[in-house]
Image: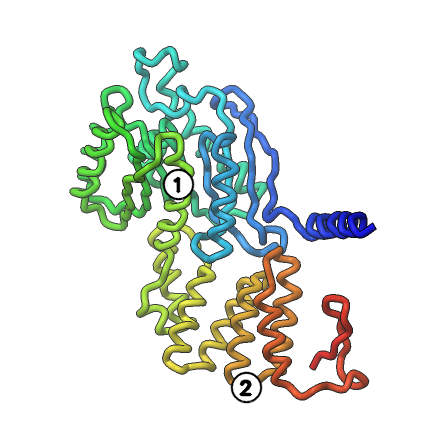
Amino acid sequence: MKKVIVFIFTLCFIFNLSADASERGTTIEDGIYSSILSEQRGLLIHLPNAYHLNKSQTYPVLYLTDGLRNFKHAAGTLDLLTQSDHAKEMIIVAIKNTHRTRDFTPTYDESYNQWGVSGGADNFLDFIEKELIPHINKRYRSNGFKVLSGHSLGGLLSIYALQTRPQLFQAYFAFSPSLWWHKGKVLKQAHTFYKQKKNLNNYLYLNLADETGHMLSSFEQYRELLGNQTRLGFDYDLEFIKDENHSTSAMVGQNRAYVELFEQFKCSPDFAALGLTGIDACYAQLSKQYGVNLKPDYLAYRYAAKKAIKDKRYADAIDIYTQLISTYPTRTDAYFRLAYLYEGKGDNTLAIKTLDKALKISLKENVENNKIKTFRAHIMAKLPKQNCETAKVYVENGKTKCAL
């Protein structure tokens, strides 16, 4: 009988876990017929976790080549990083392949005809620019900031797109790019591109795994070109990824690229010291640089509030977190941090009310909330016992309790 009870309890425990668990974000199967490519192109769309919670929020869009292969790790990594505020939430548009070599290579090279027809990169970029981007902007809440991410031949496409259409995307990711293609045609083009004087308001992340031969030699040539370039507004990060191979450089690199891109949106300490005024000034500058209207990032408020707390400007810190909640009303963390401030200034009643809001939001946001419950219990333990006849009654973990 004891074994039966244990078995039933285990089943109930597993059932409860399954009932409470839900996938973060939303995945949508989409597609578009391309008149330019004369074919149907399949798409996988990943919408951020908060996409359906805040209808007014808009997002950058990451266009991912080799979409079927890279979709899962790109979406999962981004969600993990955004939960820790190490990356920006983005809509991911994964483009499924039809003729990979045709679409990703900028020139025709008969030496590689066994891979399929080559030299169709300009047509593919026309498809993205004139058909795919308008399709995404119409269906989903994009904010105008666009990223192109590619691996191997897809990385070659990212570099080629940067050098021929820098205005098409604000950021470019290239993981183990095949820069050797057609005797280094893109390398030769890069010499002219990086000598131009016009501002290049873009960001580039590129990496290479533990690779040798023409992969390594062409990458080192490109690294030298980047080291000598002086174009204003342009920033890049270049990494050699040890103990990884050509197949895994995209998985590792996507993580690093997200984080490094996020660094581009951090406001300097001088801006943070000015509080809300400084945040607005910082993002006005970033919007001008990238040519899109960028809303202040979540961490911009966090850093400004941290600076205000350090300077003992607690009223300013509360104002900053209040504005943060107004801008990101579905972020549990914002309510938690505001409650922490209220508790610090001795307003335990307001702290409890704010934590109750945090708990409610956490269920919608689908994030862990144990630290909120622990902090709430800590504050409640300091308060005199309430009379449940006059206090608001609520139920927590099956027990009836009194609220403030």
Position of 214 compared to 347: left or right?
left
What residue does disc 2 label?
346
Position of 236 compared to 51: left or right?
left
User: In the rendering, at what x and y percent does residue 358 appear?
Assistant: 61, 67
Dot 1 or dot 2: first in sequence order is 1
User: In the rendering, at what x and y percent does residue 115 appear?
Assistant: 39, 15
Examine the image and state in which quarter residue 221 appears: top left
User: In the rendering, at what x and y percent does residue 368 appear?
Assistant: 59, 59
Position of 94 compared to 158: left or right?
right
Residue at left 34%, top 59%? 285
As drawn, 78 above or below 277: above
What residue does disc 1 label?
252
Position of 107 compared to 49: left or right?
left
Q: Residue 98 bears which disc, if any?
A: none
Residue at left 63%, top 77%? 352
Examine the image and state in which quarter residue 326 appears: bottom right
Identify which amino acid the numbered label 2 is placed on: Gly
Residue contact at pointers 1 and 2, CB within 8 angstroms: no
| Mark-to-mark CA distance, 1 and 2 | 45 Å
Q: How is the image coloured?
A: rainbow
